[in-house]
Amino acid sequence: MSKEGKWDSKNFSQKMKDSKNELTDLQNNLNELMVHFVLRALHVYQSTRPEPLRQGEIALLVKNEINNVITDLTAQPNIDNISKTAKEEWQKLQTQ
């Protein structure tokens, strides 16, 4: 909203366009983080056996790890924690 209390759709549209690069960067960071989760899982499974993981096993482990991470992140306690942290960070930004 503008300082006069009226909705400024032109300003909002411009802000959304400007923030597209930031959103892309955040998505790339999230993807990289997910790769780290998957690599951790692959290392754990590989460490339990002498022969290399087969392609089908890798594909299944990747799929399962991504699903498990998403399930964990969307569990209510995690949502509550993320929400609390985001609100606290937002308050800090507003007082600067």
Image (cartoon, rainbow, N blue to C red):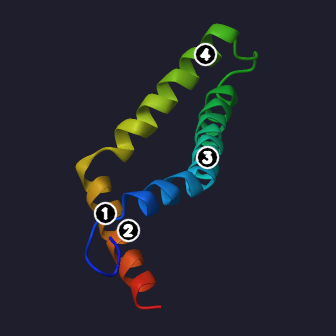
Judging by the rendered image, the residue that carries numbered circle 3 is: 24
Image quarter for residue 44?
A: top right
Front-most of residues 52 and 5: 5
Front-most of residues 79 and 37: 79
Judging by the rendered image, the residue that carries numbered circle 1 is: 83
Mark toward the start of the polypeptide (4 vs 1): 4
Front-most of residues 50 and 53: 53
From the image, which quarter does the N terminus lie in?
bottom left
Name the residue located 46 percent from the left edge and 54 percent from the top edge. 13
Of the residues shown, which amino acid type is indicated by label 1? Ser
Residues at discs 2 and 3 in contact (Cβ within 8 Å): no
Quote the CA–CA distance across marks 1 and 2: 5 Å
Judging by the rendered image, the residue that carries numbered circle 4 is: 59
Residues at discs 3 and 1 in contact (Cβ within 8 Å): no
Left or right: 95 in relation to 32: left
Residue 86 circle label: 2
Q: Secondary structure at mark 1?
A: helix
Task: Say if 78 sits above or below 31 in the image.
Answer: below
